[in-house]
Amino acid sequence: MHPLSLFFAVLSALSSTSGTPFDLNSRAVTQISASELAGFAPYTQFARAAYCPTDVLKDWTCGEACEANSDFEVSLVGGDGDDIQICKYSPSLGAVIVAHEASAILMSDIFKLRHIQGTDPTQFVSDLTDIDISLAKPSTALFPGISSSVEVHSGFLNEHALTANVILAKVKSIMSSKVTNNIVAIGHSLGGALAEIDTIFFRFNIPSASISAMTYGTPRVGNHAWAALVDASDVNFKRIDNERDPIPIVPGRFLGFEHPIGEIHIISAGNAISCPGDDDASDADCQIGSVPTIFTGNILNHLGPYEGIYIGTIFCT
């Protein structure tokens, strides 16, 4: 066996292990209704729009994704070199929307971040060759009062910190001018990791806010204490996995990473389930059951379809 293939085999096997025992008797998956699935579409289109060039986002002319949410009032747009994504108000949802893209950041190795323009998430698998993963404690300047036991991927934290204060100021401004208490963080892939961090960042800095998150194809972001913090923070958190997408199973749990509660797994078109627990659902149809190793995954599922909607640079139409 080629040394690299052997390395991946070990990595994949370890990524499917967990020190948390399953409780097979007390937890079960729940079928997602057709109406609830249809209700995800506006958020999915936000995640899709975040991949579009800033010039078409500023006047909200990004094609199908913008047309699906035609009442958006864009306040802050950036990306790639600017390190800022989309921050705007949605009258139809009565919420401030903060959307992040994945194309502004690429793993130069498994999760060490560097800037690059126009990167497609399908390149991620080829970047799983150099395990340089570190967990770090979030800055108390950005997360005042956070427990010292909480750790997050250092690259994600660094990327989030680049724009955290700018986005926070804009969110507070929109909340005041629109008289809303609702914030929704959205992102796909690495953008989903930033959206997950946003939920806790907003909770610490705008404690009275009603915070939700919809993420798509998100990798694991932090350790067990991080997942527990998300679970306990009164955030309506949903992370959507599509079929056999391998990105949500990395970094491996053996490295100390863990997803929070909120998994929704798309099995096939029109068929999705809500999976219980913190990244330890035992049902074969949940992500770690259907994609036990990266070899059993299909990276094209990372792009969709998420109930008929594909997400990525090439789908900005």
Image (spheres, helix red, strand yellow):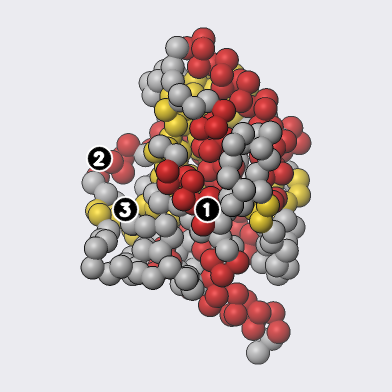
Residue 76 is marked as none
Specify whether residue 157 is in view: yes
Residue 225 is marked as 1
Type of the residue with mark 2:
Ser
Marks 3 and 1 sit apart, C-alpha to C-alpha, by 22 Å
**Residue drawn at point x = 27 percent, y = 49 percent:** 32
Which residue position holds label 2?
Answer: 35
Marks 1 and 2 sit apart, C-alpha to C-alpha, by 34 Å
Relative to 27, residue 201 above or below: above
Q: Tell me the mark number nearer the camera, choosing from 3 and 1.
A: 1
Relative to 189, residue 22 above or below: below
Residue 274 is marked as 3
Q: Tell me the mark number nearer the camera, choosing from 2 and 3.
A: 3
Circle 3 SS class: strand
**Residue drawn at point x = 25 percent, y = 40 percent:** 35
**Residue drawn at point x = 51 percent, y = 37 percent:** 199
Percent x, y of residue 115: 75, 45
Percent x, y of residue 70: 45, 22
> In which quadrant of the rendered view does residue 24 lie?
bottom left
> In which quadrant of the rendered view does residue 55 lie?
top right
Type of the residue with mark 3:
Ser
Circle 1 SS class: helix
**Residue drawn at point x = 35 percent, y = 69 percent:** 22
Q: Tell me the mark number nearer the camera, choosing from 1 and 2.
A: 1
Q: Observer-nearest residue: 23 or 47?
A: 23
